[in-house]
Amino acid sequence: MLRALYTSASGMKAQEMSIDNTANNLANVNTTGFKRSSLNFADLLYSTLEQPGTSVSAAQTTPSGLQIGNGVRAVSTTKSFMPGTLEQTGNSLDIAIEGDGFLKVQMPNGQYRYTRAGSMRIDQSGQVVTADGYPLEPAITVPDGVALSQMKIGTDGTVTGILSGSPESVSTIGQMQIFRFLNPAGLSSEGGNLYAATAASGSEVAGTAGNNGLGIIRQGFLEGSNVQVVTELISLIAAQRAYEINSRAIRAGDEMLSTASDVVR
């Protein structure tokens, strides 16, 4: 059986996965804080018919060998953490990180996750939570009587507000922290705009916004997706053409096998 059939089939499977990845990027073009993924490929093992450098005489070796590849496979996806466009909302509880860093939230099972989506809410106990109800870490609780329209979040993450009955008195409510990783591409995507730390990402490094290379916080803004539609469409067309070419290689292999069968007849 021709090796080309299996080699081309691996190419078609790889391009199918590439289109799946591109489709996910395009589906999340309007998702707050979404970071696009790119798919990485590697060639498969080679069948070595003649090793490069094989001795052909006492003083001569072959300058190249004879190796036939066996196709391609997808090896990883890489998240691009290039910043998205900041979109002004005017909502005092909407925040965007301008620069490096993540917000840290606590899950119902006690584990921690990280996010760039800063659409915040106030729950029934006055705690600042994400749109899905996960509280920030460290926790920030807004006291009764603080008007949300007058609550301010500084670029360093300091949360202040004016208490009822004291219109001229500004009270500090809490301090938001920013977290970063040595290798953010090693974070595990958990869905819901959340990431989990892994051995590849390294341990979290906490700090104050604007210090030690961390981004600053912008109140009243949300970070949009960093997906570029034109770029994704180009990737889609390239994957489609590569899929077609691999299918033609399979068709050519089938025709060669058919010709060989006719010779036997």
Image (tube, rainbow, N blue to C red):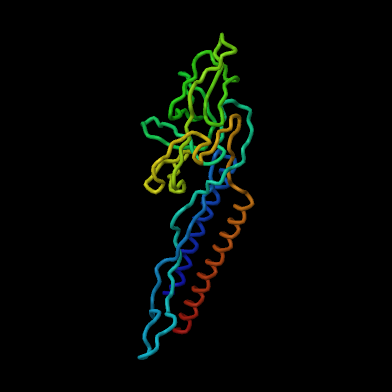
Q: Position of residue 205 (x, y in %)?
A: 42, 39
The residue depicted at 45 percent of the width and 67 percent of the height is 71
Q: Quadrant of residue 2?
A: bottom left
The residue depicted at 55 percent of the width and 17 percent of the height is 170
Q: How many marks?
A: 0
Q: Position of residue 135 (x, y in %)?
A: 45, 28
Q: Quadrant of residue 165?
A: top right
Q: Is residue 233 above or below residue 45?
A: above
Q: Position of residue 22 (x, y in %)?
A: 55, 51
Q: Is residue 192 visible?
A: no
Left-right relation of 258 to 200? right
For the residue pair 128 and 15, the one nearer the viewer reads as 128
Tell which residue pokes out farthest to the front in this image.
Answer: 212
The residue depicted at 45 percent of the width and 64 percent of the height is 72
Tell which residue pokes out farthest to the bottom in this image.
Answer: 58
Q: Quadrant of the C terminus?
A: bottom left
Tell which residue pokes out farthest to the top in this image.
Answer: 165
The residue depicted at 44 percent of the width and 48 percent of the height is 183
Q: Is residue 228 above or below residue 264?
A: above
Q: Is residue 119 above or below residue 124?
A: below
For the residue pair 240 and 221, the one nearer the viewer reads as 221
Q: Is residue 58 visible?
A: yes
Left-right relation of 262 to 94? left
Q: Position of residue 21 (x, y in %)?
A: 52, 51
For the residue pair 158 and 123, the one nearer the viewer reads as 158
Q: Quadrant of the N terminus?
A: bottom left
Q: Is residue 41 above or below residue 23?
A: below
